[in-house]
Image: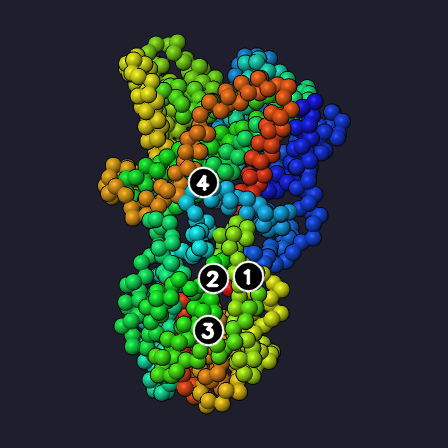
Amino acid sequence: MVFSSLEFLSLFLPAVFAFYFLCPVRFRNGLLLIASLFFYAWGEPLYVTVMLASMTLNYVLGLLLGKAQSPGARKGVLAAGVSLNLLLLGVFKYGNFVIENVNGIFGTAIPALKLSLPIGISFFTFQAMSYVIDVYRGKAAVQKNPFSFGLYISLFPQLIAGPIVRYSTVEAEINHRTSDFASAARGIRRFVSGLAKKVILANGVGAIFTSLLANGAALPAIPAWIAALSYAFQIYFDFSGYSDMAIGLGLIFGFHFEENFNYPYVSKSITEFWNRWHISLSTWFKEYLYIPLGGNRKGKLKQVRNIFIVWLLTGLWHGAAWNFILWGVYYGCLLLLEKFVLGKALKKLPAALQHVYALVIVLFGWVLFAFDDVKLLPAFFGSMFGANGLLAADTPYFLLKNALFFVLCAAACLPVWKTLGEKWQAKHESSKAFFAAETLWYVLLFLLSVASLVEGSYNPFIYFRF
Amino acid sequence: MKNKIFTGVFALLLFGLAILTLALPKKTFSETENRTLAALPKPTKETVLDGQFTAGFAKWLSDHYAGRDLFVSVKSGFDLLLGAPEHGGVYLTNKGLVDSFTEKDAKEFDKNIGAVEAFQQKLTAYGADFRLLVAPTGTEIYADRLPAGAPVLDAAPLFDRLRENAAFVDLTGVFDAHRDEDLFYTTDHHWTARGAYLAYCEWMNARGETPKTEADFKLETVTDSFYGTLYSRFGLFLPVFRDTLVAPAPEALGHVTRTNSKGETFDSLYAPETLTGKDKYLYFLGGNDSIVELSTDAGTGKSLLLVKDSYANAFLPYVMPEFDRVTVIDLRYYSMDVVMNLVKTNAYTDVLVLYNLKSFASDRNLELLPLE
């Protein structure tokens, strides 16, 4: 199931809220677990078993770590744990990628695995590993309650699309949390904002991207840049919208997840961008890969190596295709460049230029990310640089039709509204009119989002009777 | 306290929508969308495991969602606020809704003109008067009302090709001359009684006959609240434009017996029972059917084979005084036989292929016409 669907908004969520808040506190984790499993099974009726297997495996690993006393045994369990988790992820996500490439290089004909990718496996496997590693390090206690542990792995707010919640972050709240109206209200506001971002902005701009690329990657320059821009908007609103919804839902249930996005498109450098984009992933990699590898404490050469490895894997985490690896390496190189070469010079440029620099780099990055058929990349880059002319016949009309929408998207990338909103809220704390207006705003956003979902299925059948 | 109210408002919203959707009676057919609404799928082991059940459930839920039409309107309105006046492939102009016509809609044009000409060739052995009437639509006639730069296909080359055929009845000149009259509906893609009448005149002239006057046909208002196909496709359900359906009075047509493909007979060309539904254009002929037989008391000794799309439905009333018998074929549904067999077994004096430009250019069934 996905958040941006009518069955989630109108059936699942009301039901879960009703049961959760009406049932005694000691049953709440169990209820959420059942709800989360149902949520996952709805979209993955077959592979829910994979998630259950991952849950069981990591629960047992936790127990073993608790029992094992000698450092050797603990290290062994850790190694086994990490390997098994990576194996699970590897087989389902990268199995066929590896096979394709082996076949390509060695001319073998190994048949493809008849497996598809279980939804969210990249997220819950990383969460599971964070548990095992945190327990090993003593940062978290072993979770002896299988239902509570199951809940950590499968909690539906962040199961499908993150943020990647490290076990230590929610350990306390899994065992004991409270819900109150203030958090619920905050959670609702967050959820509705995320829903609107996803359904109104992301879906809208995504449709534009799809229609621009309907006839392949050879386009005139202006449509090509608009397509790149559309993709950049789409992925941001999609992903950050989902994170907003996850955080909002978490708040309602009494969980406090960490922020995953912090207005990444206002960055002035790539280093800054990666402190604002998919924060939970960079944090995970820093915590569990970069620092264990030595980070920056083993000399410059090792640091370069470590950064390179982290970025190679960051790219690979995003998908089992060469363009994602290319994308990761692209950012790895740029980050190294900024760290060791460009950094100081960059900061001396006027702010506007720094923004332009960052946005252009990010835009090209998204082009790499968008085409998982790498063969299309040269054609598309060519398009961006005028290989197919400047405009198409319908470009002026297209711009007219979509200009305001793009302005809306650009505006939605800015943090200014949040600061303004907070200022107003503080200033009009006791104003009834302000509260009414604010409530109305969120109600309208919610209804517009629902309208968007309903309209998405509107399909007037013209010929049958007309 | 504020937080309690805020949470309460959303709880109400959430539960309200859920309860309304589940509790309200379900329709099986959507008038606005002109299609049957999805049925609730039964979960079986297979359909659950392969995802068909969840997909079907999602479809059922959105089809029967409380206030569906209202929500569609809201979203369409929002889209329109943000962009150029076009939605669902329909343009909003200051004088009405106008359909779009793009390259994608003209893919079958060459194939279809070829099929018609092959059919025309075979007909010469049977001595019937053959005419091809491909009517311009509001998109062509009111092209100047469309938003600047709208990607509408230039129809001129298509009409040039049609004019190469001597049997082509060219309406472009007449329609251009009369463009200030209401030739097309403002919420529907069909032509009005006036547009159909002008077409009838041109067709009669082409056959060397004298058309009757409009007064002869005793035009009457059938309904003044007609919201047509373009209204549905546009998706904003506000009465910004509304159409009046006018048609020749039944008395002016003489005694007409209509037999549909199911063998049911009616004693009128019209189907007034359809006026209670949303699609008032169904008044003509009861809608599209694979084959409809019309017999009149015109006493002219002539018979017509009409292969058509829905434009002909509004054209037919004018034709009733000219023929004793009219066989109406819609190739989208006519699969029980080939048209050539009808030609061979009936001595039609006239044959007419009547389509509007958009359906002529995109129809995938015209290729069946010359088959034997």
Residue at 54% x, 30% y is A193
Q: Amino acid at mark 3?
A: Phe
Q: Earlier in the sequence, mark 2 or mark 3?
A: 2
Instruction: Give the structural element (helix, strand or loop) at label 3.
Output: helix
Q: Nearer the viewer, residue B147 or A275?
A: B147
**Chain under callout 4:** B
Q: Quadrant of the C terminus of chain B?
A: bottom left
Q: CA distance from mark 3 to mark 1?
A: 18 Å
> Does residue A148 show up?
no
Residue B82 got which mark? 4
Q: CA distance from mark 1 to mark 2?
A: 9 Å
Residue located beneath label 2 in the image:
B185
Instruction: Give the structural element (helix, strand or loop) at label 1.
Output: strand
Mark 3 burial class by Cα count in 10 Å: few <14, some 14-19, many 20+: many
Q: Is residue A79 above or below residue A31?
A: above
**Chain under callout 3:** B
Q: Amino acid at mark 4?
A: Leu
Instruction: Give the structural element (helix, strand or loop) at label 2.
Output: loop
Are marks 1 and 4 in one subunit? Answer: yes
Q: Is residue B159 above or below residue B145?
A: below
State the image quarter where residue B178 is shown: bottom left
Image coordinates of residue A250 in percent, x first then y, are: 61, 26
- Left or right: A21, with B136 as reference point: right
Q: Is residue B41 above or below residue B173?
A: above
